Amino acid sequence: MEYITLKCSHCEKKLLTYNPTSRKYKSPLKKCKKCGTEYLDPRCHEIAAEGIPADTFSIPSYLVLIAVGGLIIWRGLYLFSRCHLNTSDSLPWLMPTAFTIMGIVFALWGLIEIISIATGKKAEKFERLRQESEERLLDNSYARTLLNLGYCIPEKYI
Ligand SMILES: [Zn+2]
């Protein structure tokens, strides 16, 4: 996975290192701890401005996650079945255990997401996040600050 480092445009202080696929739903407005210059945290998104990503409530994408988890578990179990044959390895159980645990985590994650979509819990959570985002953007000076830093803000908030 590739990580990106963000530096302060004013004092060059290292602000954060992030994985570009990570997404958070909160205010992206932050301040450099050293010089106080405001900047946008690229991981953070205002739902009221950007909307919710299309795949958030997609059950098939989480079924894929469960399938991937299942394959990793299967691989882990396969390695378990082979590891006692290879006794020269000092930690023969390490790889199969790591694979199996990772597979279980993926499968459970997919399952929990599907349950929360099916029961409407996830929709409730995102509606709450959207309302919080809307409240922040209704503050005109906040919306303008984001706009000036290059964040795309719908006209109704400006
Ligand atoms: Zn700075």
Image (cartoon, rainbow, N blue to C red):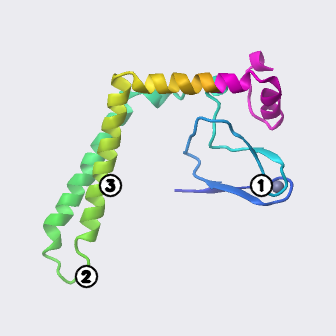
Q: Nearer the viewer, residue 147 or 75?
A: 147
Rendered position, 149 above or below 4: above
Residue drawn 21% across the image and 84% down it: 88
Dot in front, 1 or 3: 1
Give the percent coordinates (x, y) of residue 62.
36, 35
Label 1 beta carbon within 8 A of ligand 1: yes
Q: Secondary structure at mark 3?
A: helix
Res 64 seen here: no
Q: Is residue 120 above or below residue 86?
A: above
> Residue at the spot x=29%, y=56% of the render?
101
Query: Which amino acid type is marked by label 1?
Result: Lys
Q: Position of residue 109 (x, y in %)?
A: 35, 42
- From the image, state whether disc 1 or disc 2 is nearer to you: 1
1 or 3: tag closer to the N-terminus? 1
Going by the numbered disc 2, the residue's amino acid type is: Ser
* Stretch of the chain drawn in magenta: 133-158
- Left or right: 3 as drawn, with respect to 101: right
Q: CA distance from mark 3 to mark 2?
A: 21 Å
Distance Cα–Cα, label 1 vs label 3:
36 Å
Q: Which residue is mark 2?
A: 90
Image side of residue 131 versus residue 55, left or right: right
- Closer to the chain start, of discs 1 and 2, is 1
